[in-house]
Image (tube, rainbow, N blue to C red):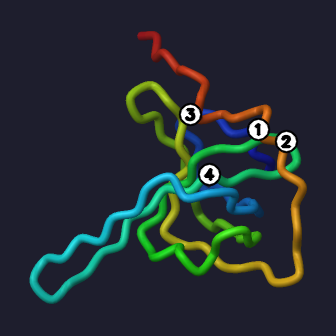
Amino acid sequence: MTVSSLSPDRYGIDISVKILEPVMALTLRDGHKTVHVSEQLVGDTTGCIILKVTQDMSSFKDKTIYVRDAYTEVIDGFLRLVSDTVEPLPNVDIDVNTTNNLSLTKFVRKI
């Protein structure tokens, strides 16, 4: 699977991508439970997209990761890749195509 092949409402996505830069990070506390939510701009040789994960990603900057069991969703008309499971891929580097940013493409649902 490649970034450029992603489209809305895809499930079961496994993909290797490089983290380019953080977009947003939040830490939410509810009693004794702490939840990290972050968005990262990630990509591969075919394009880039914003990845939303529910874990602390601060130690992953500029690293290549393997995203497992992800899905795509459209938020305010823009595509996002979402996953709860990411793993670092040591000794792997990807040259990222930043000119094809799928998160900047507006999607319109037709009924």
Q: Which of marks 1 and 2 is nearer the N terminus?
A: 1
Q: Distance between the residues labelled 1 and 3?
A: 10 Å
Instruction: From the top left corner, tell me how far across and down residue 84 is, in percent.
Output: 48, 69
Tag 1 secondary structure: helix
Q: How far apart are marks 2 and 4 (CA)?
A: 14 Å
What residue is pinned by disc 1?
5
Name the residue: 75% across, 60% down.
17
**74, 97: nearer the viewer:** 97
Name the residue: 55% across, 73% down.
85
| Mark 4 neighbour class, 10 Å CA radius: few under 14, some 14 to 19, many 20 or more | many
Q: Which of marks 4 and 1 is nearer the N terminus?
A: 1
- Residue 21 sits in quarter: bottom right
- The circle drawn on residue 8 is 3
Location of residue 106 with respect to 62 vertically, above or below: above
- The circle drawn on residue 46 is 2
Q: Return the residue found at the far left.
A: 31
Q: Which of marks 2 and 4 is nearer the N terminus?
A: 4
Instruction: From the top left corner, tell me how far across and down residue 96 is, in percent.
Output: 83, 50
